[in-house]
Amino acid sequence: MFNIGPLEFHQPIALAPMEDVSDIAFRQICKERGADIVYTEFTNCEALSRNVQRSLDKIRITETERPVAIQLYGSNGESLEKAAAITETYAPDFIDINCGCWVKKVAGRGDGAGLLRDLDKFEMVVQSVMKGTKLPVTVKTRLGWDDDTIVIEDVARMLLDNGVEALTVHCRTRCQGYTGDADWSWLPKIKSAAPDLPLIANGDIVSPEDVKAIFDMGCDGAMIGRGAISNPWIFEQAHHFLDMGEHKTPPTHVERIELCIRHLKENVEKRGVQRGVTSFRKFYTHYLHELRDSKNVRVYLMQFTEVEPIEEALLEYIQRLNDYVPA
Ligand SMILES: Cc1cc2nc3c(=O)[nH]c(=O)nc-3n(C[C@H](O)[C@H](O)[C@H](O)COP(=O)(O)O)c2cc1C
């Protein structure tokens, strides 16, 4: 059991912040399927401090998705403080600071995982956000810059000393990007370095067994990113496995396809028809991948730029799968 501000958590399973994925629609979908905490995608504190509308749109949250964190990134103290104050007016349950983004345009200029190369600056970033808000503050980061400079234990102690309320660790280095495996063997070491700092594990958690392994290692929470894109049911499946010691029945093809249609419509509502339909194409693989003949269906759906023919094709697909009799 641990707290973030007034909220009490017991082995929460969180949806990871994911740019262009964890928007209100997807957060709500995962919440309904057992995600205990959801995060917005990261938002740049410079843009936010200048009230750029696109950034303000990113931090919009709804009551039904609580508990929800808004994630910020940056390394300019003044902007961070101002962005934190603006974020507070959107009333998230807490603010998470992204100190783990590995992409060059972020980490290369010292933001995100770039902070792992300068722990004084890392500390300044945390303190600046805290200066701007009374909300609880948490941090998400990686193990270190590269294999030779793993600093996560020092980071954990520094965060605890500064009053950060939880630490999420993607168990890779910045230089790894997404290569290799997440190295969970660091998790007990981080926990020993700062036993009073709630630790949320992240990286390559894709099954109920993985979630159980994370809790068996003494972590306080588990966070799932890519595993939730391909299976938004993972949260309830993992909870069921933890509670009952057995697997929950997987979603039927009807549930998968109906959720795909709903998600598409919500995406279109948010982004408009043209962008909504094209930006959704990446999700077909995830919703349909386990279904019979899905490759042909996915290819067929790519031609459409309106919702109606896609919905029609997906409803027909349900019918075809209903009617299928194995030879
Ligand atoms: C499409 C995508 C977008 C991401 N955007 C963010 C982000 O905005 N903030 C963040 O902290 N991490 C971001 N991440 C990293 C994830 O939160 C997570 O740390 C990483 O994917 C490892 O977890 P996983 O193996 O469960 O996917 C992103 C990952 C993906 C795949």
Image (cartoon, rainbow, N blue to C red):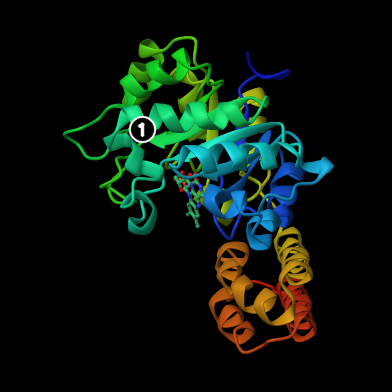
Q: Residue at x 70, y 57 (%)?
A: 57
Of residues 267 and 47, the one nearer the viewer is 47
Of residues 243 and 2, the one nearer the viewer is 2
Q: Secondary structure at mark 1?
A: helix
- Residue 95: name its quadrant: top right
For this view, does 75 lie left or right of residue 271? left
The answer, for residue 2, to whether it is visible in the render is yes
Percent x, y of residue 50: 61, 54
Mark 1 Cα shell of 10 Å, populated few (<14), some (14-19), many (≥20): some
Percent x, y of residue 289: 55, 65
| Label total for image | 1
In this picture, is 296 found above or below 173? below
Residue marked by disc 1: 121
Percent x, y of residue 238: 61, 35
Residue lying farthest to the front in this orientation: 78
In this picture, is 83 found above or below 318? above
For this view, does 196 lie left or right of residue 246? left
In this picture, is 118 found above or below 325? above
